Image (spheres, rainbow, N blue to C red):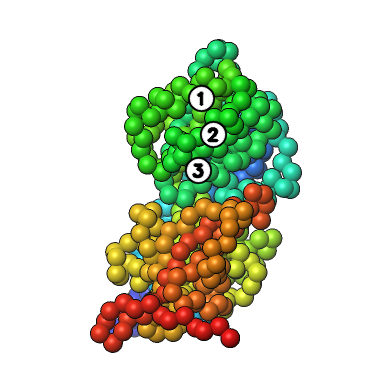
Amino acid sequence: MEAAISAIASDLTSRFMSFLIKKYTVTTVKDDKIKRMNKLLLRVHVVAEEADGRCITNPKMLTQFKILAEIMYRGYYMLDTINYKPPNDEEVKRLSIMSVSLKRSRTIFGTPRNPAIDNELETALNNLEAAVSNMNEFVVMLVGCERMCRRPYDTYLYTDNFMFARHAEKQQIINILLQNPCHHSAPLVLPIIGGCKVGKKALISHVCNDEHIRSYFSFILYISGDSMGRIEYAKLKKETSLIVCEYFTDIYEDDWINFYSTISQMTAGGSKVVIISRIENLARFGAVKAVRLNSLSKEVYNYLFKKLAFGSIDEKEDPKMALVANDLAIVLGVSLITANVIADLLRRNHDVHFWLHILQRFEGMVKNNLSKYGEHPKDIIEKEQPVDATRFVSSYPTHLHIMPPRVETDDLPNIGMPTIFFGDLIAGSVAIPNGDFEIVTCKSRIPPYTKYVSSGTSFADDKNGFRTMRKRRSSS
């Protein structure tokens, strides 16, 4: 009997020691992979930043740069998934788990060792190692590219006007516009096609502000497609011109032919026409392949949002806030305008409870729209439909609907409607006006002070369930 007990004890001890050794080995291997990934990310990030400050004219180099940046952002996203463990704060953990129900990401709460996460870590690491090993020729050729002057003002524009992660597209457009065809040739037409609020106008604005573009073109004119038939041709000059046309609807062939013929006659050789639109069919008018803008990937968007939210503060100093920021990036649905508005709120109030407050309010609004319409608010806005923002209202049974934002400038006359800011609405720090009102979604702090404005309507259901507008408060 003693011999049997001794054998069992010896076997259990052996198994326990094997378990500890295996666990230590797995942890050590994983830690080594994370260290290697951090070192590789640093090398890739240095090259990516250097490329972002160079004028790259080679299309293949631009493609390689874009791939390199995508691999880098996936690596950072992977590290976030691994590094931010479940917090002890129950409120943070509860709200973080809530965002998983939106089915837009995976949670990191669960077993300490997730085979799927391990596989993704291995894939991300392999991609980074392959990128670094193939980076030498790119770096050598990069040295020969002209360095662009990046002033602090330009850096501010890059984050405030959504130019993040668009360097390859910007340089591609500049390269096309600087093509120097025959002096008497008709204007080259470049279509820029992209979805709702992905940054098409911001991108072309930065292109037009580029010193190479300004020195090449003597005259730049912006035209709305809706007023194409009423264009003031007196504004056109017999100079090398850049005509930027934005279209919200498709146009007839005859209308385009007439417009293009007029532009050809009234501008000098070397002029160019840029078409900006969501409509894929307009690419048929292009003389070159259309530049297409898609929404940022979740990895790039996550990186951008946290950089905007934390500002100069290192996110590693407060893992709980970084975790909340990760969940907010999920809830926002890759909306650039909303990212800037909410990041500005978070940056000005660096408190985890305030961040949780914003997450809870916005998440409630998103879930309400998913429940009622089966779509995320960003997708609803892209269809030009109103979003139900009732969760932003504290007084029941008041309802609030918000229309998609439109572009306005400060030189427009005041229509006399009550106006509030979207950030104040999200934070719950402003009283909702009665009836119809205006919401300033996002406002540029630099010329020409463009702002996005939405129309909002607050109303109440009467006891029979019918919608009734709330009576305006009498002014005293």
* Residue found at x 35% / y 75%: 7
How far apart are labels 1 and 3 at the CA level?
A: 23 Å
Q: Which of pointers 2 and 3 lies earlier in the amino acid sequence? A: 3
**Three-letter residue code for mark 3:** Lys
The answer to which image quadrant residue 2 occupies is bottom left
How far apart are labels 2 and 3 at the CA level?
A: 24 Å
Q: Which of pointers 1 and 3 lies earlier in the amino acid sequence? A: 3
Q: Element at badge 3?
A: helix
Q: Which mark is residue 263?
A: 1
**Three-letter residue code for mark 2:** Glu
Mark 1 touches mark 3? (CB < 8 Å): no
Q: Element at badge 1?
A: helix
Mark 2 or mark 1, whichever is nearer to me? 2
Residue 92 position within the rendered picture, expressed as x and y whole percent measured from the top left: 50, 77
Q: Which mark is residue 200?
A: 3
> What residue is pinned by disc 2?
232
Residue 299 position within the rendered picture, expressed as x and y whole percent measured from the top left: 48, 52
Which quadrant would the C terminus be assigned to in this image?
bottom right
The residue furthest left is: 464
